[in-house]
Amino acid sequence: MRLFKKLTMVSAAALVALLLVGVGSALAASRLADFKWTVTGLEPGRQLQVQYKGGVTEVVKSMASAKSGYTVVLGKGFALVQDSREPTTIQEWLRVDSERVTGTAVVPAGVSLSVVNVLTGNRTTVADGPFSIPTGVTGASTEPSTRQP
């Protein structure tokens, strides 16, 4: 009977460990990163694009704050077309599965594009071409903040 109790306790402990590993893996796959992009100097009628290639599994929410112009969410990324030279911010909540988000940006000459990781406060300047941005997410999944850009 003692052997049966020991085996049962060992089996229960192993089951709990497996469940915890499974839950941890699920949480690791569903982390959110909060990015605030800032665009300045985009001439009227010109376009800027950001396309995510690695690290982003889903764009959860994307909001633009501009006096004029508009953004279009393009699957895993966005395009911005301006009607004036007003600075524009775009805040995105991205579901990420790695420590870095990679992609490609199309940034016209004379345009400044940067992104602040709201979770870490780190700013990354993004030039025309490939980019790599640290997500800074190391904990469990959280919901997007309610802060507006």
Image (cartoon, rainbow, N blue to C red):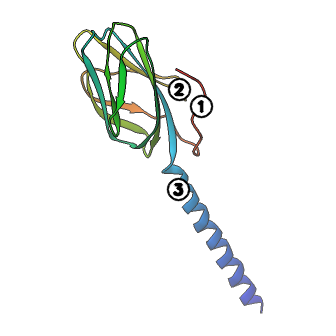
The three-letter code of the residue at mark 3 reads Ala
Tag 3 secondary structure = helix
Near-viewer residue (4 or 102): 102
Q: Nearer the viewer, mark 2 or mark 1?
A: 1
Residue 22 lies, in percent from the top left, at 55, 62
Categorize mark 1 by other alpha carbons within 10 Å: few (<14), some (14-19), many (20+). few
Q: Which residue is mark 1?
A: 145
* Amino acid beneath label 1: Ser
Distance CA(mark 1)–CA(mark 3): 21 Å
Pointer 2 with pointer 3, Cβ within 8 A: no
Q: Quadrant of residue 69?
A: top left
Kind of residue at disc 2: Val
Of the numbered discs 1 and 3, the one sitting upstream in the chain is 3
**Cβ–Cβ under 8 Å for marks 1 and 3:** no
Q: Position of residue 116 (x, y in %)?
A: 46, 22
| Residue in front for this viewpoint, 106 or 132 | 106
Between discs 2 and 1, the one toward the N terminus: 2
Read off the residue under disc 3: 26
Q: Secondary structure at mark 2?
A: loop
Instruction: Compare residues 45 and 13 and report the one nearer the observer.
Output: 45
**Residue 64: x %, y % from top left:** 44, 22
The mark nearer the N terminus, 2 or 3, is 3
Local crowd size for mark 2, using a 10 Å CA cut-off: few (<14), some (14–19), many (≥20): some
Residue at (72% x, 83% y) in the render:
6
Q: Is residue 138 above or below residue 82?
A: below
Which residue lies under the disc numbered 2? Answer: 118
